[in-house]
Image (spheres, rainbow, N blue to C red):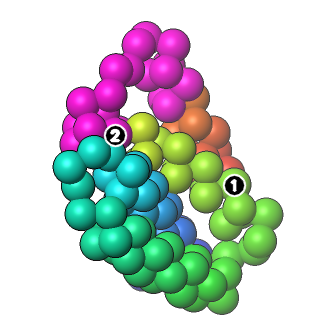
């Protein structure tokens, strides 16, 4: 596997972890939830995201890694739709598709 592919996968994994961290922070402010547990999980996921992203920078240019970081919008939206039952309209779905297409163009 080429080093660029490794960098891309690390940045995608980092974006996924950041999306999970955002969901944890949202859960920390909901009523009847264990606030400190969700806050701690969010901070932990953010720390892991920073480590993965930093490793990804070893193999990618900053301009590529930063652009691929936009996948965080996709993971956060999909996770909030799936886990928090938030509403997604057509415009939001279209926006997510355009982000994926744009990231794909940068990664190639």
Question: Residue 86 location, x and y as percent?
Answer: 32, 28
For label 2, the SS is: helix
| Other residues around mark 1 within 10 Å, as few (<14) / some (14–19) / many (≥20) | some
Judge by depth and name the residue closer to the eye, 84 or 48.
84
Magenta stretch: residue 39 in it?
Answer: no
Name the residue carrying label 1.
67
Name the residue carrying label 2.
80
Residue segment shown in magenta: 78-97
Q: Earlier in the sequence, mark 2 or mark 1?
A: 1
The answer to whether the residue labelled 2 contacts the one labelled 1, judged by CB atoms less than 8 Å apart, is no
Residue at image coords 22%, 42%: 83
For label 1, the SS is: helix
Question: Residue 22 location, x and y as percent?
Answer: 45, 55
- Seen in the picture, residue 99 relative to 36 is either above or below; the reply is above
Judge by depth and name the residue closer to the eye, 84 or 67.
84
Q: Can residue 9 be seen in this view?
A: no
- Seen in the picture, residue 108 relative to 73 is either above or below; the reply is below
Residue at image coords 42%, 63%: 21
Mark 2 vs mark 1, foreground winner is 2
Main SS, magenta residues: helix
Place residue 80 in its image quadrant. Answer: top left
- Most extreme residue toward the top is 90
Per the model, the C-alpha gap separating discs 2 and 1 is 22 Å
Residue at image coords 52%, 52%: 72
């Amino acid at each position: 596997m080429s080093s660029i592919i490794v960098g891309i996968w690390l940045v995608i994994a980092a974006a996924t972890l950041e999306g999970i961290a955002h969901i944890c922070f949202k859960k920390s402010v909901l009523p009847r939830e264990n606030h400190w547990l969700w806050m701690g999980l969010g901070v932990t996921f953010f720390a892991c995201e920073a480590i993965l992203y930093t490793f990804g920078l070893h193999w990618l240019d900053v301009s590529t890694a930063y652009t691929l970081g936009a996948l965080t919008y996709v993971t956060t939206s999909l996770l909030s739709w799936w886990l928090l039952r938030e509403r997604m309209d057509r415009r939001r779905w279209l926006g997510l598709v355009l982000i994926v297409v744009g990231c794909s163009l940068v990664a190639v």
